[in-house]
Every structure is written in structure tokens, then in C-alpha cells.
Image (cartoon, rainbow, N blue to C red):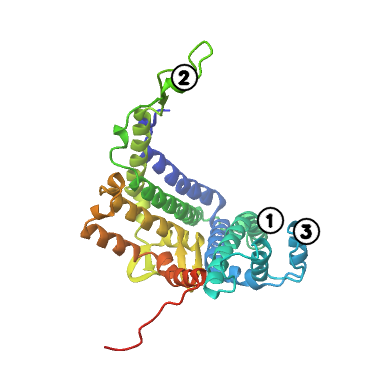
């Protein structure tokens, strides 16, 4: 496939403006009242999800389900049937699945807080899938009921009701805008991940040889009649021109996305970074991280942000000769400072340091002496 001919800027514009145009068209055809109801239902659908996400997960985490333990026991023999909450299920699962001589203390509150955070993330993903399937249907039913009440199709309504198609087109456009914004929540997170992955690629990736040649000593190989292995054989790898075409397409995609008019417009919507009150972040990225994250010790751990930090650290190391020489002494002072400055931005690493020390002390059964004497 020839990626060089793909015009990503054109496709992005077609996609975004088609959604806006279709929203305006349907709003015009439906009229003011129906378009207003449809817009409010659509806005409420997404607003309820993001505004109540943490509340729903916290409620589901401790909500008592009497037969929960019995259900799990059918799949996992030995599981206590008295368990009736998701939190209790996670605690019991660790005791059942892990061996008794497991070297980690499962009663460690820091460790269990981490396990609970990851488990709640799994619950959050399941809830999101259910909300955007079953919840979408339920909101659609509510919309139909409201339209039947406030926008009846009686002859009287058709004769004397105000269509006001201009306002209908306006609210249709607003509904399309909400749709584009929700789409950008997903796109912004995926583009950020792609940015991080691309930064890990070496600059000379296209200079690699197209063939890798292996040579074997033939003297130790038994030959009945014909040669079993030739003097050498080549293992082909993908043509570097194809790799170059793919990487070029990725670069154009990133550039087209970041310079797109719709994207740059919505990127003006910013919010204070929860992990750094002195910084701001795009609202789309904030909402993306709100879903794909978990909480540990009252700190939000966003997977996208942690990946970007890892990529930034890796790019600093790849710029040195450490990987070629294997000698850490090749790291200069500026490189070391850059690595630690970047790692300090990681919410995950900062939160795991106390837990790592506790687990290490428990594992090696050693006490860390602390000098309490003052100079």
C-alpha cells in the first residue's frame, strides 16, 4: 500500500466538517423544538458519564451483591461464597490464587491500595462499555419520550407549532459540535500515544541493511548427499522504502492533526493539570486521562502521561552512546539531570517509591537503620 498518496489533512477536514454539516442539516429538517430536545439529551448523555464516573465506580466498588461470591466460586474453586462486594472479591482472589509461600505480604496497605486502584480501573472500563451501549439505548428511549411530550406530531401541532428551522439548524450544529468534541477526546489521547511511540524510534532506522546474513560452519554438519545448509543464507526483512513510507505517513498524520483548524480550536479549551497546579492541559486530554487512569493514594495515575514520560526518558538515553557501549559512564551530567527531572514528573514512580522500599525491606527481612542523632 502506498501511504505517500494519503492526504490526512483532507480526510480530517472531511470527517470533522461532515459531522458539523450533517448536524446542521438534520437540525434544520427537524425544526427548533425537536433539535433542542435532541441536543439536550445528547449533551446530558456525555455530561452524566464524565461527571459521575468516579462516583459510580466508588459506589460499585462497595455495593453489596449477595450472590457475588457464589458466582465467582463456580469459576474459581475455593473462593469464599460469603464475599458480596467487588473490593472483598479482589482481596479474596489474592488469597486464593497466590501460593501460601508468596514472598509479598498481601496485608500491606500500600500494596493493596495499588491492587485496588488497578482493579477499579478494570471496573471503570467495563462500566464505560456498558454505558456507551446499554446507556445509549436508555437515553434514546428517554429522548423519544420527551419528544412525544414536548414535540407531538398532532395535526394541531403541525398546523400551529413553530418549526423555526433556523434555530433548529443552530442546535443541530451544536449537537454536531458535541460529537466532534467527544471524537477529539479519543483522538487526542491516541495521537499523544503515537507521539510517544514515534519519539522512541532511532533516527537511523532507515539506514539499516535490507538483509541479515547468517554464516554457519559446515564442517560439523552431517551431509547425506546434498548440502543441508548452504555456506550462508539471507534473512530478508521488510524493505526500508516501505518502512520509510509508513513513518512518513505517521509524521504527516501527526502534523495534519496538530495543525487542523478544528483541533486547534478545541485545544484552546484548557484546564488546570491535576498533578501540577502551575500547568494547564487540554480539556480533551484531561477527559481521556480521566477514563484511562486509576487512583493510588489519592493520586491519579494516567497511562498516557506515564507513557509519554517513559518515552521522554528513553529518548534522552537513546541520544547517548550507552546502548552501544553498555557503559553507564557514557551518561553525562546533563543527561542524568534530564532523566531525573523527567522521572520526577511521573505520578506513578513518585507514588511507588514508598511501596518499593517497604516491599524490599519485607522481602530481604532487613531493617533500615536511621540515624536519629543530630550533628
Q: Residue at x 36, y 45 (%)?
A: 198
Badge 2 local density, few (<14 within 10 Å), some, or many (20+)?
A: some
Regarding mark 1 in the picture, which secondary structure is present there? Answer: loop
Quadrant position of residue 56: bottom right
Q: Nearer the viewer, residue 356 or 229?
A: 229
Residue 270's disc number: none
Residue bearing the label numbered 1:
154
Badge 3 local density, few (<14 within 10 Å), some, or many (20+)?
A: few
Residue 284 in the image: above or below residue 350: above
User: Who comes first in sequence, dot 1 or dot 2?
Assistant: 1
Residue 10 in the image: above or below residue 336: above
Spatial CA span between label 3 and label 1: 55 Å
Q: Nearer the viewer, residue 213 or 288?
A: 213
Badge 1 local density, few (<14 within 10 Å), some, or many (20+)?
A: few
The C terminus lies in quadrant: bottom left
Tag nearer the camera, 1 or 2? 2
Quadrant position of residue 141: bottom right
Residue 229's disc number: 2
Residue 339 in the image: above or below residue 22: below
Residue bearing the label numbered 3:
74
In the rendered image, the residue lying farthest to the left is 333
In the rendered structure, are the residues bearing label 1 and label 2 in contact, judged by CB atoms less than 8 Å apart? no
User: Would you say 320 lies left or right of 39 here?
Assistant: left
Q: How many marks?
A: 3
In the rendered image, the residue lying farthest to the top is 225
- Residue 292 location (% of width, % of height): 50, 59
In the rendered structure, are the residues bearing label 3 and label 2 in contact, judged by CB atoms less than 8 Å apart? no
- Residue 86 location (% of width, % of height): 66, 68
Amino acid at each position: 500500500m502506498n501511504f505517500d498518496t494519503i492526504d490526512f489533512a483532507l480526510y480530517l477536514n472531511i470527517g470533522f466538517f461532515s459531522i458539523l454539516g450533517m448536524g446542521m442539516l438534520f437540525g434544520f429538517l427537524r425544526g427548533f423544538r425537536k433539535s433542542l430536545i435532541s441536543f439536550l439529551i445528547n449533551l446530558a448523555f456525555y455530561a452524566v458519564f464524565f461527571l459521575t464516573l468516579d462516583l459510580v465506580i466508588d459506589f460499585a466498588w462497595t455495593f453489596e451483591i449477595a450472590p457475588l461470591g457464589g458466582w465467582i466460586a463456580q469459576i474459581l474453586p475455593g473462593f469464599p461464597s460469603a464475599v458480596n462486594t467487588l473490593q472483598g472479591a479482589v482481596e479474596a482472589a489474592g488469597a486464593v490464587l497466590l501460593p501460601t509461600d508468596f514472598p509479598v505480604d498481601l496485608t500491606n496497605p500500600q500494596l493493596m491500595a495499588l491492587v485496588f486502584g488497578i482493579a477499579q480501573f478494570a471496573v471503570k472500563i467495563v462500566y464505560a462499555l456498558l454505558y456507551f451501549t446499554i446507556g445509549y439505548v436508555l437515553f434514546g428511549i428517554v429522548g423519544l419520550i420527551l419528544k412525544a411530550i414536548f414535540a407531538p406530531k398532532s395535526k394541531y401541532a403541525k398546523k400551529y407549532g413553530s418549526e423555526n428551522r433556523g434555530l433548529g439548524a443552530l442546535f443541530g450544529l451544536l449537537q454536531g459540535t458535541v460529537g466532534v468534541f467527544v471524537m477529539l477526546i479519543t483522538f487526542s489521547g491516541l495521537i499523544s500515544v503515537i507521539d510517544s511511540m514515534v519519539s522512541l524510534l532511532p533516527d537511523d532506522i532507515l539506514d539499516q541493511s535490507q538483509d541479515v546474513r547468517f554464516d554457519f560452519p559446515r564442517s560439523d554438519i552431517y551431509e547425506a548427499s546434498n548440502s543441508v545448509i548452504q555456506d550462508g543464507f539471507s534473512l530478508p526483512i521488510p524493505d526500508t522504502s516501505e518502512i520509510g513510507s509508513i513513518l512518513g505517513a505517521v509524521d504527516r498524520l501527526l502534523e495534519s492533526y496538530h495543525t487542523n483548524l478544528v483541533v486547534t480550536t478545541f485545544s484552546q479549551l484548557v484546564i488546570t493539570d491535576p498533578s501540577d497546579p502551575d500547568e494547564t492541559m487540554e480539556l480533551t486530554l484531561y477527559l481521556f486521562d480521566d477514563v484511562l487512569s486509576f487512583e493510588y493514594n489519592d493520586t491519579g495515575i494516567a497511562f498516557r502521561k506515564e507513557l509519554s514520560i517513559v518515552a521522554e526518558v528513553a529518548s534522552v538515553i537513546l541520544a547517548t552512546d550507552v546502548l552501544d557501549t553498555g557503559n553507564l559512564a557514557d551518561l553525562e551530567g546533563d543527561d542524568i539531570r534530564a532523566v531525573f527531572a523527567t522521572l520526577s514528573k511521573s505520578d506513578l514512580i513518585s507514588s511507588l517509591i514508598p511501596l518499593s522500599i517497604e516491599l524490599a525491606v519485607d522481602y530481604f527481612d532487613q531493617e533500615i537503620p536511621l540515624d536519629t542523632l543530630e550533628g
